[in-house]
Image: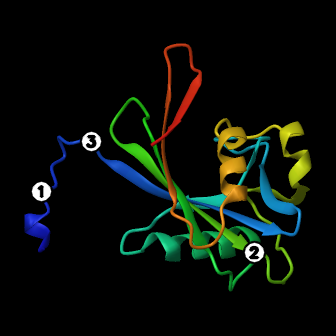
Amino acid sequence: MPVSDQGVSLDRYMLVPRTLVFVTRGDKILLLKGAEDKRLWSGLYNGIGGHVEQREDVLSAAHRELLEETGLISYNLWLCGITTVDTQTNPGVCIFIFRGEYSGGGLELSNEGSLEWVEVSDITHLPLVADLPILLPKILEMKFGETPFLAHSRYDETGNLILTFV
């Protein structure tokens, strides 16, 4: 369908696409602890990721973000899930969540924060980004080839996260 037939209207609700990548190595997962001067999730642990650029597909964006933030390449990433985030404004956010197995290579320093291999059993003791305590168990139990999950997150009037799986 040509661009003119896509039905895009600035009056409609839109989503900004982002990627989030989790690389595992045995019983460890690679997490990024946000730099103290970071505007979002300073001092909190998260996966690797960022925005999808124009003319870039989500898988290519995931590979690019992984390389930019860790120096790691050549991972067989697979889609685990898609989460929409209601930002209570327009646009919202759509996060494409990928997982991959570590296949070697050294980590580079990241200006986003510090990279750490964390024992999966220690995750519950870390200061995580708000949705990770709910998402990580689901992501870690996923196997290659399984149907990706769909989720939606929003915040209630008091600022509490509400994450539902579809």
- The disc at residue 7 is 1
From the image, which quarter does the C terminus lie in? top left
Where disc 1 sits, the SS reads loop
Q: Are marks 1 and 2 in contact (CB under 8 Å)?
A: no
Residue 97 in sight here: yes
Where disc 3 sits, the SS reads loop
- Outermost left residue: 5
Q: Please identify the quarter of the rendering in which residue 104 is found.
A: bottom right
Instruction: Name the residue located 67 percent from the left edge and 76 percent from the top edge.
Output: 67
| Closer-to-camera residue (24/149) | 149
- Outermost top residue: 158
Callout 2 environment at 10 Å: few (<14), some (14 to 19), or many (20+)? some
Q: Which is more foreground, mark 3 or mark 2?
A: 2
- Residue 128 horizontal/vertical position (percent): 76, 40
Q: Are marks 3 and 2 in contact (CB under 8 Å)?
A: no
Instruction: Name the residue located 15 percent from the left edge and 49 percent from the top edge.
Output: 9
Residue that mark 2 sits on: 101
| Closer-to-camera residue (39/100) | 100
- Residue 21 horizontal/vertical position (percent): 65, 63
Residue that mark 3 sits on: 13
Residue 96 in sight here: no
| Rendering colour mode | rainbow
Q: Which is more foreground, mark 1 or mark 2?
A: 2
Q: Give, as a three-letter code, the residue at label 2.
A: Glu
Instruction: Name the residue located 56 percent from the left edge and 66 percent from the top edge.
Output: 146
